[in-house]
Amino acid sequence: MAASVPAGLKTADISRFAHRAAQLEKPKPIAAYWCNYWIVNQILSKGLHNTDEECLSYTSALMDRLEKFKEANADEPAVSDDVAGKAYMEQFGLETFARADNAVIANKASRQTADTFQAAATFLDLLAIWGPIEPEITTKIKYAKFHAADNNDDEDVITKPRQPSVVEVSDDSDEKQRALAQTSTLDQSLHPSRDPSAPPPPPSQQRQASVTEVAGEADRLSAQQHSLHPSRAPSLPRPQPQPQRQAPTAVLPTVAAAATTTTAPVVVDEDAMARAQKHARWAISALNFEDVPTAIRELKAALEDLGS
């Protein structure tokens, strides 16, 4: 996919991730996948997919690509497992950082080194997908961004006419670039478990779920809606007969009456139905990214389209 980003999405700080995803699509498709994953995450969390038709089409197309890639690589731990995915991107980001840092240490820094530092910072920023970034990594990100800016501003550095790839092992070797494209393989024994320190989301909202589970199954949508709106607790068995049992009895007819009112026949035209379905799909996608506020907003919009 081209690295160009719609104007309506510029405020989301995703252009640098789109640029790297385009560069890595063939040599490092897994890294490109996580760049694109972060892009979708940012768009949905900020509600930018509804900015205009171009933004909506861009987001939908990217989500479809993510879904197809994940299905095609279901057996790849770095794609299907959080622990393996984080380890893969951390290793790849640190390798990229080391190449640029070695050039600085050898006093051979150039604008190409600056680009490598920028790439390293972008890859390490992706670790936020799996929770707070560790202080040591945060320090490297700041260091990389500082040197990227420093080398870009230095008019004395020598630049090369070709556009370098971010997966080069050194600043002047195409052969080593191809070799690196086959490195950074991950230990296949990593277990698909989440970080125990992070509170696990409800089962229907776990990130390991398909990135764009928008098949439209009514039972799945209903389950996710219930995860947002806790169901009423059932009446508990009373230890002994007391006058207090009248309180639950009085509540039950009220709930039934409300349900009866809600299910009254509503006439909805085809356009409104289509809009409601679109909002429902976006709500499901938002839940896949654990973005509850966006899911709530989209579900409310769907209800409004249905006249509720």
Image (cartoon, rainbow, N blue to C red):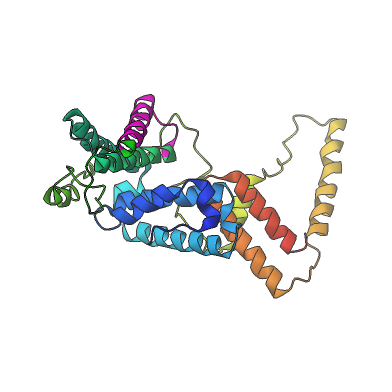
As drawn, which residue projects farthest toward the front?
156
* Quadrant (top left, top right, bottom left, bottom right) of the N terminus: bottom left
Tell me which corner region of the image, top left, top right, bottom left or bottom right, holds residue 304.
bottom right
x, y percentage for residue 262? 79, 58
Q: Is residue 177 left or right of residue 251?
A: left
Question: Which residue does the image show at 53% across and 44% down from the upper left?
Answer: 290
Front-most of 7 and 187? 7
x, y percentage for residue 192? 35, 42
Tell me if I can see residue 74 in this picture: no
Q: Identify the main secondary structure in magenta.
A: helix
x, y percentage for residue 144? 33, 33
Front-most of 54 and 233? 54
Q: Is residue 91 left or right of residue 130?
A: left
x, y percentage for residue 236? 72, 36
As drawn, which residue projects farthest toward the bottom?
270
Q: Is residue 17 magenta?
A: no
Q: Is residue 147 magenta?
A: yes
Front-most of 182 and 144? 144
Task: Please give the range of residues in magenta.
Answer: 130-151
Tell me if I can see residue 127 in this picture: yes
Front-most of 308 and 132? 132
Question: Which residue does the image show at 21% across and 37% down from the upper left?
Answer: 99
Question: Which residue does the image show at 25% across and 37% down from the upper left?
Answer: 156
